[in-house]
Image (cartoon, rainbow, N blue to C red):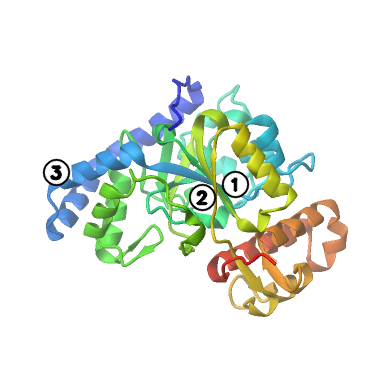
Amino acid sequence: MKMLGKRDLSISQQLAIEHITQYARTRKCEAQKTIKEVLQLSNIPWNTFEDTVFKLLSNARVALHFHPDRPIADMKSVAQALLEQGIYKNQFETHISNGSVSAYPGGSRDLWEKKMFGGAYQLDGVTNSQRPKYGALDLMLHPDGPAPRFGSCYFLLSPNVSYRCTYTYLDSHQDPKEKGTYAEFDDILAAIFKDTFIRNDAIGEKNLTPRKLIEHLLYSLEQPFKDPSKREPNRNLNHYIEAQVHDDIILNDDVEVLVADPSFKGTYIGDVLEQICLKYSIELYWHMGFAMHVEEIPSDFRGSTMPSLAKRIARNDYIDASVVGAAVNDLKRNPALWSDRGVYEEVLQELKYMWHILVQFGNPFAPE
């Protein structure tokens, strides 16, 4: 396991974490009441819950999803930049996004960060590099990651990094009321246990009861990482614990595992991913991937234009992560050639939706 050296957080980063900690502290009493009710009704002793929380805080890792072939400002790929720089950058630095394309002063991401972190990142002298990076806490260990909508590949960080994160239950742009840090995590835990009790469904896991969740967290989080290449994806598009990582993410220190999409195997991007892992001592795995024939693309999930887009971008009548990425790169280089589908931002959004379709409905990737 990579060990995280002591980091000196910037003033803004310290203030952001403290702001969320203080907020969660105001909700602690109600959160603990909810937890105790669920545990009592589920016949789970309090000391078992405490043991579970200890295991979670000791072992849970944040996953950072990304598309390795997306172009950054100088048209280098994300993977190339990671290899050369050894640092995972945020959207204010890269100016690309797999969610909201609004990372600029006065943009919606800037405004919701201002609200969420009490203006910590709007103080004078704050640089773009000090802004948080976004991921998801990987509790259920799904082979395709905890939040695959945000990228075909994902890094798993050292558990030590989780202590300098803030968390929201679901996506932060929705301004969920449940927030926390490892210093005050009860609000997040209460939300999970409440969902498992009422819905039997939480953080993308169906048929999940409070007892099943306890057993999983107690025994699974500390196990060695399991090869995801033969495990069915969970396809969790919408229900995750978002993590906001404060301070730098240095590949050599902070990243332990890379799980990559197999459509990049044997390609230039795949080679770069392998070089990243060799250079920065990261374990490399491949998940099962997602692929669909153009005739399988639905017209009632992410819009009626999806079938025509699939036919336009398909390679040998198939769509996969690398095919979508190639289309994004072509759009970036030749936006005028895509004008029949709309302006640049509209077509980029369509291509994002195509990835969502692959995650939701795709079959395992089968190399030719």
Give the number of the mark in front: 2 or 3.
3
Query: How far separated are the C-alphas under marks 2 and 3?
Result: 35 Å
Q: Amino acid at mark 2?
A: His
Q: Quadrant of the N terminus?
A: top left
* Element on which disc 2 rests: helix
Q: Is residue 321 left or right of residue 361?
A: right
Q: Secondary structure at mark 3?
A: helix
Q: Quadrant of residue 73?
A: top right
Q: Residue 306: percent from the left, percent from the top?
A: 68, 72
User: Residue 269, position in %: x, y?
Assistant: 71, 48
Residue at label 1? 108
- Lower sequence index among marks 1 and 3: 3
Within 10 Å of the Cα at label 3, are there few (<14), some (14-19), or many (20+) other Cα atoms? few
* Dot 2 or dot 1, earlier in sequence: 1
Q: Residues within 10 Å of mark 1 (few under 14, many from 20)?
A: some
Instruction: State the mark number for residue 53.
Output: none
Q: Position of residue 115 (x, y in %)?
A: 48, 40
Q: Pointers 2 and 3 in contact (CB under 8 A)? A: no
Q: As rendered, which of 286 and 239 lies closer to the eye?
A: 286
Give the residue pinned by disc 2: 173
Task: Write down the residue under mark 3.
Answer: 47
Query: Which badge, 2 or 3, is on the more N-terminal residue?
Result: 3
Residue depicted at x 54% and y 68%: 360
Q: Quadrant of the C terminus?
A: bottom right
For numbered disc 1, what is the local secondary structure?
A: helix
Name the mark nearer the viewer: 1 or 3.
3
The image position of residue 303, as x and y in percent, is 64, 73
Q: Amino acid at mark 3?
A: Asn
